[in-house]
Image (cartoon, coloured by chain):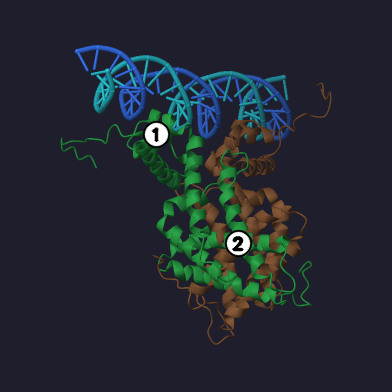
Chain colours: A brown, B green, C cyan, D blue
Amino acid sequence: MEDHRDSERPRSRRLPREVRERQILDAAVEVFAKHGFHNASMDEIAETASISKPMLYAYLGAKDALFIACVRREAAKLVEAIGADIGTGLAPADQLWHRLHMFFEYVQVNKAGWQLLHRQGDVPGEPYVQELSEWRERATALIAGLLAEATTDQKQPMQPEQTEPFAAALVGAGEALVEWWFQHPDFTAEGMAMRLMNLLWLGFGELVEGRSWFPSAKTETSTPS
Amino acid sequence: MEDHRDSERPRSRRLPREVRERQILDAAVEVFAKHGFHNASMDEIAETASISKPMLYAYLGAKDALFIACVRREAAKLVEAIGADIGTGLAPADQLWHRLHMFFEYVQVNKAGWQLLHRQGDVPGEPYVQELSEWRERATALIAGLLAEATTDQKQPMQPEQTEPFAAALVGAGEALVEWWFQHPDFTAEGMAMRLMNLLWLGFGELVEGRSWFPSAKTETSTPS
DNA sequence: TCCATTGCCTACTGGGGAGTAAGACTACGT
DNA sequence: ACGTAGTCTTACTCCCCAGTAGGCAATGGA
């Protein structure tokens, strides 16, 4: 039997299924992140994964299924990163700080995965929107929990109607800050987390202590006509 | 819908170009908002506008161009709403409050237009992303200006490196809040504006006065094991 | 050595939807 | 009446790309 090894295999051939699947997912995440779901073509994903198209379908199924698989994997990584079990007994503020820090570090290390989760259109009717909104909900719930916990000692613990929108806003602010960060990369993850922490926690602290902003009396807010 | 009452108009026919163009834009905004750019079909837009496809192309051009025209129109409305000239001499805080209020009212009244501007994927390489990011930049700049103005009296006026990310975060928080609002419609625009104002302005006020949050010393941010 | 299993490929089909050709209908001026 | 300018339509073409049919090749057990 001639071992015709002219050179190293130009294309890694005949790998066990498990390895291939990881390769494919890596390639898919990359391509989906670069072009978005719609503009990403299965051909390009196949080529990036150094594999032929039928393999794609044999292993991960149709485009929707493949995308969902990507989202699940990346979302799991993200949620694990920001939801990891930290040493018990940390004050909510410190926990939030820690998790924000983890978040920005995750994004920095895993840029493609982040863009996959963030830059898709939120159009209802798509098969994958459910999957996409899930991580956001989980993150929001996590933060809402922290906010509620932070006020359990107070006379008036915050109700979900208070913490939920606050948490949602915080998540949105975080996403927007990441986008800004991409255009100003000269900051550390810690610095970004610090920014977000300052923007929100200070106001939160004030709120908890009963202070709140209100419009000055004369500039009326009623319908201006 | 097919009220064939054999009376005058089975279908509004032969309208002057100007009127048709508005009809088409209205239909396009609706359809793009509902399905997103990619899943919206020119056929559906044509049908919604009660017109045939070639008219679409004759009047507004290709799909990209049509979408951009929609974005321009809706973005102009939005920017005009939040950037409108208010009575002079208002304090920055009151201005911000006013504009946030206008913003939430705009979204409430003009839901389709808002979704058009917000729910598309931000994938680089698309012909329309430039157009889409523009309104965000304008809004951010507007707010950044307010923040800067609010601190001109202070010993240390805030620099763009401070105000910009803050403004970007605020815009992101606003977008996220709107999304939350859509799922909890039992709040007024004023209430939502109030929420956002409280979340951010209080923290901002604290920051300006030199207070800032910092992690408690001992709980280190290194590996938590 | 030969078969079976499983990884893997080239080369196709089919459909959806963007964009168009070519002509019909209406209104108005002369 | 008759042209002509501008509105409007039916009925296509064509391309891109998701998804597939059917066959080749390597490994491993007998």
The number of callouts visible is 2
**SS of the residue at dot 1?**
helix
Q: Position of residue A185 (x, y in %)?
A: 75, 54
Q: Residue furthest left?
A: B6
Q: Position of residue B121 (x, y in %)?
A: 56, 46
Q: Nearer the viewer, residue B162 or B178?
A: B162
The N terminus of chain A sits in image quarter: top right
| Lower position in the chain sequence, tag 2 or tag 1 | 1
Q: Nearer the viewer, mark 2 or mark 1?
A: 2
Disc 2 target residue: B143
Residue type (three-letter) at the residue carrying disc 1 = Asp
Q: Residue at x 70, y 52 (%)?
A: A182
Res C22 quadrant in image: top left
Vertical placement of residue B183 versus B9, above or below? below
**C-alpha distance separating marks 2 and 1:** 40 Å
The C terminus of chain A sits in image quarter: bottom left
Q: Residue at x 64, y 61 (%)?
A: B144
Q: Residue at x 45, y 69 (%)?
A: B190
Pointer 2 chain: B
Q: Position of residue A148 (x, y in %)?
A: 56, 76
Disc 1 target residue: B43
Is residue B86 found left or right of A10 in the rendered image?
Answer: left
Both marks 2 and 1 on one chain: yes
Is residue B73 among the parts visible in the rendering?
yes
